[in-house]
Image (cartoon, rainbow, N blue to C red):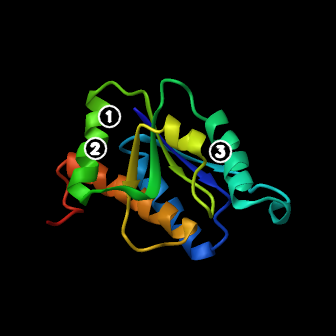
Amino acid sequence: MDILLITVGKTTTGYIQEGIDEYCKRLKRYISFSIKCLPDIKNTKKLTESQQKTEEGKTILAEVSTSDHVVLLDERGEMLTSRGFSEFIQKGMLGGKKRMVFVVGGPYGFSQDVYERANAKLSFSKMTFSHEMIRLFFTEQVYRAMTILRGEPYHHD
């Protein structure tokens, strides 16, 4: 199974990108993992929040195939423990999913079309984090999930 993380906008903070790169490097020994950074929408000052979400939604949905299992990283999603997240990924692997696509939206969230396409929503916390930090947290949690599934000593209960 492949895991793809789709993000709107680039990671510009150096230390966060270094952390993401480190976990991506570690993940290579476990699973096919990639990140697709979609460009920010141009001329957002001329757009309402709804229009911006719609435009971002179009670019997100253009990257998703009909067979993908799409999971939105959304503040209203289900919260899982690290073990629960590893089971979530394992379920996708055992269920024959070819690709799980996780999505971090833009600053205003997702369009209705993206919500309707999603198979699941997950939340990392009731707190709000920057989109860049969520990318790092997510990448680390995928790595943690892989070590849990392999019984390796990275995670401690």
Up/down of 120 relative to 98, above or below: below
Q: Is residue 75 left or right of residue 34?
A: left
* Residue 146 coordinates in the image, percent (x, y): 30, 49
* Residue closest to the eye, 15 or 118: 118
* Residue closest to the eye, 150 or 132: 132
User: What is the number of callouts on the image?
Assistant: 3
> In the image, which disc is placed on residue 57?
3
> Residue placed at 56% from the left, 75% from the top?
15
Q: Which residue is mark 2?
A: 88
User: Mark 1 or mark 3: which comes first in sequence?
Assistant: 3
Up/down of 22 relative to 53, above or below: below
* Residue 151 coordinates in the image, percent (x, y): 17, 50
Q: Which residue is mark 1?
A: 92
Choose mark 2 or mark 3, whichever is in front. Answer: 3
User: Mark 2 or mark 3: which comes first in sequence?
Assistant: 3
Q: Are marks 1 and 3 in contact (CB under 8 Å)?
A: no
Q: Quadrant of the C terminus?
A: bottom left
SS category of the residue bearing label 1: helix
Q: Amino acid at mark 3?
A: Gly
